[in-house]
Amino acid sequence: MKLVWSLFLGILLFSSCNSKIKSLYIGDLAETNENIRQFDLPKGYKSTCREPLNYAPDLNYPLEYYLQEVRINVHFMDAEKGKFNFDRSEGEFYFDQMMENAIMRLDVNEKMRIPEGNDTEVLPANYTYVLMDMDTEVGRSPYAFHKDDELYWFLSKGKNRNNSRKEVLTKYEQDKGKVLNVFIQPTHPDSVASKTYTTDITGIAMGTNVKIAGVYELGLPSWQHATNLNHEIAHILGLSHSWYRNDGCDDTPPNSNCWRSTKSGPCAGPTSNNMMDYNSSQMALTPCQIGKMHRNFHKQGSKQRKLLVPQWCEANNSKSIIIDRDRQWLGAKDLKNDVIIKKGSTLEIYCRVSMALDRRIIVEPGATLKLYNAQIHNDCGETWEGIDLQSSSKGSGKIEMYGDCKIENILK
Ligand SMILES: [Zn+2]
C-alpha cells in the first residue's frame, strides 16, 4: 500500500513538474533572457505598414478585422419660411432608411466590371455608420433641423455656387473631428424652378463633414441617395475619384467615367461600377480602396481614426486570437483580445499593434514571436500586461526582435 501511494505521489509530482508552465512577463526590451534575441533588420527589409492591401479585411480572422463604426450625425437645413426640406417628422425616417440601404451596400459590395475579365476580389467594406446624439432644437438627438435663410441652400453649378463654402459647417457642426457631420441641403429653390438648371443628386466632402443635395427636392425614394452618401463619406475616409490614374490603387483602372454603357463611343463595352466613379451603380469597392480606408482607420492621429468608435479600447477576455499556423501581420492592428501563439507556430509583427486593457500576448513553449521595427502598445492611455514568454521542461517560447522595436504601456 505504501509503495502504491508513493508511486502515485511520484507520478503526480513528476507529471505536474513536467507540464508546469513558467511565465516570464516581458515589459522591457532590456530584459535579458536566452530566449529573447535582438538582430539588425534583414537585408532588403522594406516597411509594409503603408500598403493598403495589408489592411484589406480577412474575415477568416474576425477578431482582428472587426467591423469599424464611423460616428455620424445629421443636419437638415431649411429656409425660415417655406418648405424646401424634410421636417423632423419626415426626415428622421427618410434618413434612417437611406443609411440602412447605404450600410447594406457597403456590406454586399459588387464585383468590379472593369477591366473586362478581371479577377479582382470582392470583400465587404467592413465599416458601418452609427448615429450619435448632439444638442438639437428638441434636446439630444442625432438629427438637427435648422432654419437659416442665409445658409440652408446648396448650389454646385453657376455663378452662385456655394458647395465648397464652409459657413454652414462652421456654424452648425458639432463634436468636430469626432463625429462626421452630414448636412442635407436643398438645391436653391430658384434653381430648382429654373428651366435651364438640372437638379442633381450631388454633394461634397470637406474635412470631416459632407454636404449632400437633391435629397428632398427630387422626390425620389431614399435608397436612391444611398450611394451618394457612401461616395461622399468615402472621400472623408481617404478615397479619391477612381477614374483618374493616380488614385493610389492598381485595381481601379483609369476609365472614361461613364454613367452607363452605350452602344458606341467612349462608353461602349463594360463601364465602371465603382463607388468612386460617377455611374448609375456605384456598388463596387476594390480590395485596395477598402484597404486604404482601413489603413487610415489604423493610423494614429489620422482624422479617420478619430471618427471611429474606439472599439480597441473595450477589452474582451471571452475569446483569444489563436495563432496556430505561421502568420505575418504586415499592417497595424488594434486588438481587444489576448493573442496566443501556439507551439510550433510563428507570428511575425511588422507594424503597430494596440493591446486593450490588461490583455497579453502569450508565447507558448515551442512558439516564436518575431518583431520587425514593431511597436506594441495600448492606444487608449491605459496599460496591457505584456508578453508572456512561457517555458516548460519541454522547451521555451522565443522572441526575436529585428531593428528598432518598442514594447510600451505595460502594467508595472
Ligand atoms: Zn466625389
Image (cartoon, rainbow, N blue to C red):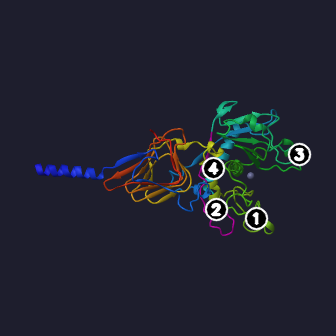
Sequence-wise, which precedes: disc 1 or disc 4? 1
- Is 345 covered by the magenta stretch? no
Residue 334 can be seen, yes or no = no
Q: Which residue is under mark 1? A: 261
Structural crowding at the residue carrying mark 2, measured as other residues with C-alpha within 10 Å and reported as few (<14), some (14–19) or many (≥20): some
Sequence-wise, which precedes: disc 2 or disc 1? 2
Give the CA distance from mark 4 to mark 2. Answer: 23 Å
Residue 124 can be seen, yes or no = yes
Q: Nearer the viewer, mark 4 or mark 2?
A: 4
Residue drawn at 66 percent across, 70 percent down = 117
Residue drawn at 81 percent across, 40 percent down = 153
Mark 4 residue type: Asn
Q: Nearer the viewer, residue 261 or 50?
A: 50
Give the CA distance from mark 1 to mark 3. Answer: 32 Å
Q: Which residue is under mark 4? A: 296
In percent of width and height, residue 79 lies at 80, 35
In percent of width and height, residue 411 lies at 45, 39
